Structures are given as structure tokens and as C-alpha cells.
Image: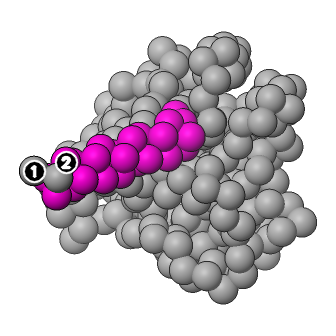
Amino acid sequence: MKRFLVAALAASLSLAAATIAYAQEGKVGVVVKIGGIPWFNAMEAGIKERGAKLGVDASMIGPTSADPALQVRAIEDLIAQGVKVIGVVPNDAKVLEPVLSKAKEQGIIVITHESPSQKGADWDFELASSTGFGEAHGKLLAEKMGGKGKYAVFVGSLTVPLHNAWADAAIAYLKKNHPEMELVGDRYGVAEDVDKSRSTALDLISANPDLKGFLAFGSQGPIGAGRAVEERRKVGEIFVFGPFSPGQGQKLVKSDAISGGFMWNPKQAGEVFVTLAQKLMKGEEIKDGEEIEGLGVIHPDFENRNIIVDQLVPINKDTVADLAAMGL
């Protein structure tokens, strides 16, 4: 009986210690650009699954529209709740600076994604470098257009740093390597809204009968542009490239309304949010050359607080069905 009581007491103390350790880790809240779309549904699945595996209380908040003010409000709510880590996929890097700084002042760890060198963040992580991602899409478009003709560029908004960095890289690559390709306008901040992407693409097609391509950086941009191409019966004449959810876009890929693109795995990004959150909550430092699950071997930019790796996943007729079957 004594042995049983001792063992029971030891087990109880062990459980209590584990509970205290869990409580000390605290909650993780991740605020994304917009809720209810496939890309961020996949990210939420990654957050929940990784949280359950690591024993971290992690959840995602998806605003009803891609409005920076709604992200600010969500972050304010997380600060009020006293969470230990706030993750963000920003709609507007500058608008979020004050509220992220406020979070850090209150001892909250801040991790961002799709916003390199974000002010107010402890770390930003990327699964694709901006130059590599932009140039890869530019090359695909140039191949389809034969290196000449008019094209348009969509981004999520004109204040999303990463989307604009991709656009900068793609445009610079095309200017240098395919000078006969002509950019229509500058760029249009519609690619996180499928309806705005569609209507903008329809307007551009009407205004530019010789338009040959769209580069759409933002998960809803290729979908909207692809639908516009189908509506105007321009499949095979106008080519659409960009990152998008394979499940949402596979019919458009199979019909050639979307020619393809590259992505990273948003579910994997959700997992990385939780992995980094737990590591930082434990007080562990990010080190050059270490291997972190979901990122591989990393070589951080300590000055700008960026962790950037290249894990591009091609989306095309050969891959889209398998990617969609994964829930992406």
C-alpha cells in the first residue's frame, strides 16, 4: 500500500509539473489575412494539428475581410487575453507596427509570415525567398507568352510587402530578360479578393484587347483572373500564373484558364508557427545551421529577424489533383 501511495503521489506530482509547464507556455493566437478561404483553412489545420502534437494551446483568427483594421482589432483582443505568442500574416505591415510593438512591450512574442523584416516582430519566417518566388513565376509567364506581349500584375494589396517583393522580382526579371514584354499599368491590389480580381481582370481585358497574361500574387488573384479568362473565352490566348489553393483552382487548371504557378504548403506554415512559438516560449534561441521541423536547416538573417528557406511546390496539371487531395 505504501508503495502504491508513493507511486500515486509521484504520478500526481509529475502531472502537476506537466500542467504547470503547459500553463507557463501559455496560449498562441495566429491572426491571418482573411478567414474562410482554402489557403488559410489549410493553415488552420496545420496550427491545430501541430498544437495537439506538441501540447500547445494554439488557435487561428481569420477576419471576415482582408481589412488591416480587423487584424489590429484581433491582435488587441489577443493582447487583452494575455496570450504568450501572437502570430500574424499581415495585410498591411505598416498599419500593424504600433499594435505589434504594443504586444512586444507587454512581453508577448510576435512571429510573422509573408512579411519579411516586419517591424514589431521577434521573427518572420518564409517558405520561399521573394526573389526566387517572383522570378520563377516570371519565367513561366515568359515561356507561355513567347517572351513578348502585354501582361498585368495583381498583388494582395499595395501595402503587403511580400506580394510586392514578388512582383518587383518578377517585373525586374522580365524587363531584363524579355524586354518585349510590356507591363500594363503598374499593379493592382486585388489578389486577396476573388470578386475584385475577376472584375479587375475583366476590365483590363476589355481595355487591352492584346493582353496576353496575368501574374497574380495573392491566393485569390489567379482564381479571379482565371474566371475572367473563361468568361471572355480567352483560354489559350491569355495566360494566368500565381500562387493559389490547388483545391480551389484545380478545375481552372484542368481547363487551362489558369496555366499554373508555385506555392508553399500553407498547412506547413501553420505548423511552423506553432513550432517556433513553442521554441521561443521555452526561451530557446534561434541558431544558424540548426534544423527546425518544417523549415529544414536554417541560416537566419539576425539583423532583420528573418528566417527564409526555399521550398517551392509547382502547381500544374500534373500536380494539382494530388495537392488538392492533400486538402490544400
Report the front residue among 49 and 213.
49
Residue interval drawn in magenta: 3-28
Residue at screen point 62% across, 36% down: 84
Report the front residue among 205 and 174.
174
Instruction: Give the residue type at disc 2.
Output: Leu
- Contact (Cβ within 8 Å) of mark 1 with mark 2: yes
Residue 316 image offset from top left, x and y in percent: 31, 65
Residue at screen point 68% across, 58% down: 283
Q: Is residue 20 magenta?
A: yes
Q: Main secondary structure of the magenta part?
A: helix
Residue 328 image offset from top left, x and y in percent: 29, 50
Residue under numbered circle 1: 1
Quarter holding residue 260:
bottom left
Query: Around disc 1, counting alpha carbons within 10 Å, would you say few (fewer than 14), some (14 to 19), or many (20 or more)?
Result: few
Work out which residue is located at the far front of the displayed protein and give it: 2
Q: Is residue 275 left or right of residue 287?
A: left
Residue under numbered circle 2: 5
Residue at screen point 57% across, 50% down: 277
Answer yes or no: is residue 192 visible.
no
Is label 1 in a helix, a strand or a loop? Answer: loop
Report the front residue among 11 and 77.
11
Q: Is residue 152 above or below residue 198?
A: below
Residue at screen point 48% across, 15% down: 64
Q: State how far apart marks 1 and 2 are (Cα).
A: 6 Å
Q: Which mark is residue 198?
A: none
Protein image colouring:
one colour
Instruction: Give the residue type at disc 1.
Output: Met
Work out which residue is located at the far bottom of the displayed protein and give it: 289
Q: Is residue 223 left or right of residue 175?
A: left
Report the front residue among 136 and 31.
31
Q: Is residue 218 magenta?
A: no
